[in-house]
Image: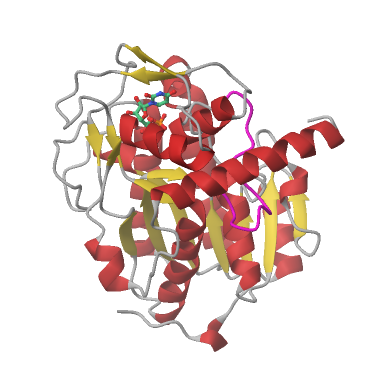
Amino acid sequence: MVKSDDSAKVPVLVTGGAGYIGSHAVLALLDKGWDVAVIDDLSTGFRWAIPDEVAFYRGDIADAELLARIFAEQGSQAIMHFAGSIIVPESVSDPLKYYDNNTVKGRALIAAAVEHGVPHMIFSSTATVYGEPDLKPLQEDLPLSPVNPYGMSKLMTERILADCSRAYDLNHCVLRYFNVAGADPDARSGQSSIGATHLIKVAVESALGKRGPVGVFGTDYPTPDGTGVRDYIHVSDLADAHVLALEALIAQPERSLTMNVGYGRGFSVLEVLDAVDRVVGQPVPRVMEGRRAGDVPSLVSDNSRIMETVPWKPRHDDLETIIGHALQWEKRLTGLRDGQGG
Ligand code: UDP
């Protein structure tokens, strides 16, 4: 177990810090007293998601001149890399966008870190790298065979990082996320994209009358109730895992890590919707539909590695809490959009 050392804080550059997960990582870092800067092109993120005390650079993560300026101005000693494209079906129809945004630009960011001697990097990866897994909890050392360009574009960046850590003074941590949901408990940030497709976001939008009934995509999977099972994790617990991973990288600069971030348990679509009903206090309308292309029956993490490696203590490991925070944010978002025009 790598213990945190409070004296070891360094200036951190967060790429994609205006986005959903990146903005929560910024909050987690600030809450613990780290010095944070953000680079984001605002293609999907929101300027208002970045707190005022954070230095903000609008631009591209592959812009070498801009990165050189940021490193000089901020003295960045670590990068948390969230910027990227994340929509699986879009990656199938437009793979070049994914190899460009996630792999080519990731390579450019890593090159800049190496050139300027930034010694630590945390990388947002995904359970999608496991491909079509069987029903057992997924362990990090399984063979990796992504079945779509999104997962492959992330896996390629994992590989670039692994090779660069062997060759240069750079250690890194790959975090493979399971299903991220919920919002900051104080409603300072949350999932804000329009037209989101993720189950909990869709369900709270439906509960607030922002869309029609929730489609249940597939009722004939080999799972206990026939609907898809996922390991839903609270975004603020995920953000905390990033800070702990960074502390581990700083404490042991020779060591790189790859860790799943999940709670190690799954809920079916129907279990999620029943929990939404309880949180909202009335049934959320639902319609049974066929399977969605590309979905797998079950994705549940084996999280023993992260639990043994860093002192990660999930604070919101409760489905109704995750949904409650998502709902609270969705209500706040309505106000933000009404007040600011979107
Ligand atoms: N799902 C669903 N209806 C929706 C959105 C998702 O039934 O409107 C199901 C989906 O088939 C999967 C689970 O919910 O079994 C989680 O899907 P989500 O899109 O949230 O995340 P993914 O696991 O695809 O990354």
Tell me which residue sits at (73%, 53%) in the image.
Answer: 50
Quarter location, residue 220: top left
Q: Does residue 62 appear anywhere in the picture?
A: no
115 is within the stretch colored magenta? no
73, 174: nearer the viewer: 174
184 is within the stretch colored magenta? yes
User: Is the residue 56 above or below the residue 225 in the image?
Assistant: below
Farthest residue toward the front? Answer: 281
Q: Quadrant of the N terminus?
A: bottom left
Q: Is residue 67 left or right of residue 52?
A: left
Residue 241: image location, x then y, percent: 44, 63
Quarter of image, ligand 1: top left
Tell me which residue sits at (32%, 64%) in the image.
Answer: 257
Residue 323: image location, x then y, percent: 49, 44
Q: How is the image coloured?
A: secondary structure
Residue 181: image location, x then y, percent: 48, 44
Residue stretch rendered in magenta on the structure:
183-195
User: Is the residue 90 above or below the residue 84 in the image?
Assistant: above
